[in-house]
Amino acid sequence: MLHDLTYLHSILANLPKGQLFMLTDSHTAEYCLPILADSIGEIPYHLRTIEAGEQSKNLASVQAVWDFLFKHRATREALLINLGGGMITDLGGFAAATYMRGIRFVNIPTTLLAMVDASSGGKTGIDYNGIKNGIGTFTQPLATLIHPNFLRTLPATELLSGFAEMLKHALIASPEEWIRLLQLAQEELPQAQFVAALSERGLLHNSIAIKEQVVAQDPREAGMRKILNFGHTIGHAIESAALENSLQHSTFNIQHSPSHGYCVLWGMVAEVYLSVVHAGCPREVLQQLTQIMLQWYGRPQCDCKQREQLIQRMYQDKKNEANHSPNFTLLRALGEPIINQHLSDADINEALEYLFSL
């Protein structure tokens, strides 16, 4: 369940002595842990910090967390607080779900991406052998605590990464939210005002609510929850390739390694293109999303050989069904997603051609 940070007091009230554990990354340990200190008070806790970045979302890091829990004699009554972005909440949730067959954990997301996507929904996991979230579980946290002030600690690129998932939620569920997010993007506010607008205009709350409503109807992604995968079939392929340097970061027309949100945004552009061609989605939606990409996210670049590699990665996607081509969620229109759409390699290549030629 979602709560604000004050709810942590009631969670910790009856926790056995020595059974509070904290997982952070190298950034959140410095910038966010001091903010959390008042909520924890005088309760002692054990701290484990891992290096920030998606490259740490691996089996070695999970083993380090397991070792940390065993070293400090965590029991099944223990509580693990995951303080960080999506990498920390995914990895920490997976470590908690598997340690002694499961201990309780609380997610406190510190990035916009984690607040609107990664920290809620009950998905935990790590990347494995180049496959994004290749190993994981469906395990709900005891609670997810939202504290918007953490957003003030983020660089602009992290805010844009989370904003991409907010755009996704609007595209699949709410034409009204799509219009409001377009308006916000067009205002080009200074960063502090942008962060304030997310909370003051209810945009952060509404985006979280969209995901929560979908997950409540389909906790284990048997059907409707697949609409949340919009943009992720192509986006995960780009992200996985970048992580393995099959696509060198220098081939992307941006000044940093591509984060999850950037990759999803690029994936959504390509998948809206597929939606226009194969599902009747209005071309205006493609034009609007493409403009946001060009204005804020930059152009990914890729040659023909690399496009073939991306398509092959889509065949490894965990969303695929047996004996089928890559599985897509497409849009008939704003707020009208359709799941389980299978397209040919030629169709996918055409969408990639659109994306990479902008």
Image: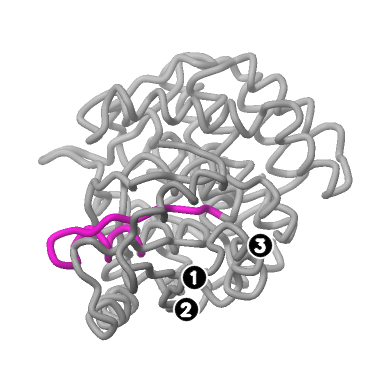
* Relative image position of residue 16 (x, y in whole percent): 30, 64
Q: Which residue is mark 2?
A: 49
Taking depth in this image into account, of 51 and 103 the one nearest to the observer is 103
Position above or below: 356 against 63: above
Q: Amino acid at mark 2?
A: Thr
**Residue 24, numbered circle:** 1
Nearest to N terminus: mark 2 or mark 1: 1
Task: Report the side of 201 relative to 23 (left or right).
Answer: right
**Circles 3, 2 touching at the beta carbon (< 8 Å):** no
Who is closer to the viewer here, 124 or 257? 124
- Residue 84 within the segment the image draws in magenta: no
For the point 42% across and 64% down, which residue is it?
241
Dot 2 falls on a residue whose secondary structure is strand
The circle drawn on residue 35 is 3
Tell me which label, 3 or 2, sits earlier in the chain.
Answer: 3
Q: Where residue 70 sits: x, y (%)? A: 22, 80
In the image, is residue 76 above or below residue 353?
Answer: below
Can you give x and y, in whole percent of width and height, for residue 322 in the image? Answer: 11, 41
Which of the two discs, 1 and 3, labels the residue nearer the N terminus? Answer: 1
**Dot 2 and dot 1 residues touching (CB under 8 Å):** yes
Name the quarter where the C terminus is drawn. Answer: top right
CA separation, marks 2 and 1?
5 Å
Q: Quadrant of residue 129?
A: bottom left
Which of labels 1 and 3 is toward the front? Answer: 3
Q: Position of residue 357 (x, y in %)?
A: 62, 47
* Segment tinted magenta in the rendering: 92-109
Which residue is located at x 26 percent, y 59 percent? 134
Element type at marker 3?
helix
54 with respect to 250 (left or right): left
Tell me the amino acid under the disc marked 3: Ile
Q: Residue at x 35, y 51 (%)?
A: 311
Quick one: label 2, few (<14), some, or many (20+) residues within 10 Å?
A: some
